[in-house]
Image (spheres, helix red, strand yellow):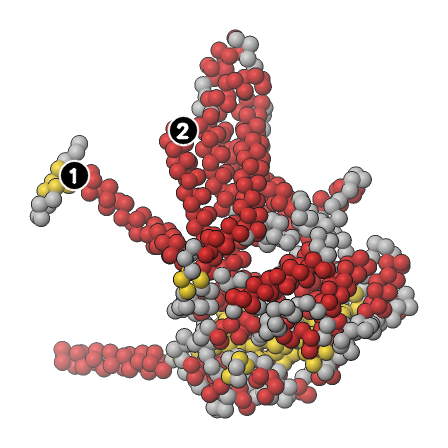
Amino acid sequence: MKYYFSRIWAGILITLLSFSFTSSSYAIDIKLWDLSARQGQDEFYELLKKEVKKYNPDINVIVTEWEGEAYKTQIQLALNGDDGPDVFFNWFGEDSARLARAGLALDLTPYADMEGGYGNFISKGWQDAGAVDGKIYGIANKAVSKYFYYDPAFFDQHNLSVPTTFGELIDTCKSIKAIDPSIVPWPMGNSERWKLNHVITMLNQRVVGAENTKADYALTAPDDELFTNPKYVEAWEKVVELNENCFNDAPNATNPELTRSMFAAQISPMMYCGTWCGGIFASEGFTDFKMFRFPRVEGGADDGTVGFLVAEGMQVSAKTKHPEAAALVASINVSDTMALADAELRGSLISNATLIDQLEDAPHWFTFYVNDIADKSGHVNVLDVLLEANVSNAYLDMGTEVLNGTKSPQEAMDFIRKVALEAKAAM
Amino acid sequence: MNKTQTNSIGFSLSSDRVSVIILLIPALIFCTIFIFIPAFWAIVGSFYSYGMTSLNDWKWVGFDNYIKASQDEFFWIALKNNFIIVFASIVLQVGVGTILAAILDRGIKYGKVIFRTIIFTPMVISSVAVSIIWLLIYDPNFGILNNILIAIGLPTPSMGWLGDPDISIWMIMIVAGWQNTGFMMVLILAGLQGVSKEVYDAAEIDGATGVKAFWYITLPMIRNIIIVAILITTIGAFKVFEFVYVLTQGGPSNATQVLGTYIYLQAFNLLHMGYANALSVVLLVIALILGWFQLKASRRA
């Protein structure tokens, strides 16, 4: 009897042990960090988990979401530690390139053409968005752009037309103020400094032009030429003009979210906002808005066809214990199915548009973004992502100073040039 | 009683001392992990140049980071702001706290508990939540402060309460004062309640009542408590971070930068970890000096 019991117990133990070994030895946990999104994120990641399992049933994707400001710090700390994410969100530009140069981001080039690899899903152009020195360190799944949003009912009611030049934009602001001085034509919330940075990004593009800014932005221009082009000062002068005619009082003390609500509540008839804003306005009950591009500047270097575009996507930690599985998760994130879901659920401007025709009931703003981006002659990345950190910070600070009138456009550029020279010397 | 025992290898230890050492070990372990080791690495790191994304690539720079700090105008702005906050906090928090405590102790007969609770309540709210509440109050477009001023015909600052570099630091002070005055009041009130009523009775016979009694009797009697309150406020003012970070992030144009936010900016935004370490060491030295004063004053109190 005792013999039989011991055999039964042994059998149970062996069975349990074999089950536990089967499940634990093959399970691969992939930690994925992303920014929190207002809509559709939970459904999106549930689908991603299922899609990944189609390629490798042993991979468990564990998603953690972060707020933007906290994330910028947290990701750098985590990547230096031993318990960071395997796959993580990043803005493509200096932020992502810095991680690649520091050896913290994995070279994903070898995984492009594996089964389920990103090379099967996104074009060479989109792949290059995550390239550093010819190697792919990030897989772009979407991009954000910026547009002027306006209230067509207000414009029609007051016979205002959509401005196509900077001069017309200023005239439109003046006309709106003439209708009612208490209306803010274009609410500007620069309390976090980045709002105006996006405007000066476009003004530099329109006034100075991509060819003339390239060497300055990369800090490769000779010392005696670095940021000396007088057109930079002209771009800042346009900011002064906007501040006098279009913006609300105290833009540096105004929260950007409040300005979005001012437009969504139709208190202000116009604002410059990202492609993430369309969904936000709709969620606040305003859907009858329209969009137009940042107007060209008369006599400027750009004809107005170059647009603001920041690619975003996933990078893989160089410290991941499962590089192939992590690369697979980042790749599946841009698969045909996931890209369609990204557009449908999160309203993203996706990098893989293979199934875009299947997108049902796309809101009018989404269709506008997709068509307009395809129609642009080129793209410009935002200065706070593109520039070296110190120069970027100088541009952010000078935005505040110029808006407050505590520094003139010339003084602002003198300061930026000084910081740029120091940054170049330290490189 | 001080018992002495001899252990197996011949050392002689008093049992009290053994108990003290054993009881100190947990605290020492935590202090070592969370204070001494980070402080040591901050001191070491301050002599190197490295970034958040290049932690394995330390470059020896000697005292360059300290020299850089001495020539950095924003470091001096931050340090100056810390001193402004120290001074203003003492006036606002300790000064007003003392007056409120005196009123609650002897000035009013009814409702002491209600007033004490109301004044103390902001202290139990998190600093971040307090800052967000005040962000709404200060908002230049829809904030209640501007609306009140406009309603009574007074001007409002054109750059906004938090957007004007000349006033923004004082606006932060008001928020900090609003939250912390209640704590100072309770601290000083405890001291006041320790003052014997007989002293006031004797003073009354000598003709010292009201403000005179407060000035000549109350203040000297609670002098040590006030010194502790001043030191607590001073150290808190040097550590200030949340109010500035949430309300202005050090802006506009670094006008409200304090050492805490400037260290954060250098470390995590500009990625100058070595330089941020050097600034932290400066802050550490200041905190140590103030801490020493606080300990001395506490013992006297």
At x 73%, y 56%, the residue is: A408
At x 63%, y 71%, the residue is: A216
Above or below, comparing residue B113 to residue B268 in the picture: above
Residue designated by label 2 = B301
The residue nearer to you, when weighing A123 against A277, is A123
Query: Where is residue B12 drawn, in percent x and y?
Result: 12, 41
Callouts 2 and 1 close, C-beta under 8 Å:
no
State the CA–CA distance, disc 2 to disc 1: 31 Å
Mark 2 lies on a secondary structure that is loop
Query: Where is residue B163 drawn, in percent x and y?
Result: 68, 51
Residues indicated by labels 2 and 1 sit on the same polypeptide chain: yes
Q: Going by the image, does B39 lie left or right of B179? A: left
Query: Where is residue B214 drawn, in percent x and y?
Result: 54, 20
Label 1 is placed on what type of residue? Ser
Q: Going by the image, does A337 lie left or right of A260? A: left
Number of numbered discs overlaid on the protein picture: 2
Residue designated by label 1 = B14
Q: Residue furthest front?
A: A224
Q: Going by the image, does B158 lie left or right of A44? A: right
Label 2 is placed on what type of residue? Ala
Q: Quadrant of residue B45?
A: bottom left
At x 46%, y 31%, the residue is: B227
Counting residues from the start of the chain, the first of labels 2 and 1 encountered is: 1
Q: Quadrant location of the N terminus of chain A? A: bottom left
Mark 1 lies on a secondary structure that is strand
Image mark 1: chain: B
- Whether residue B129 is visible: no
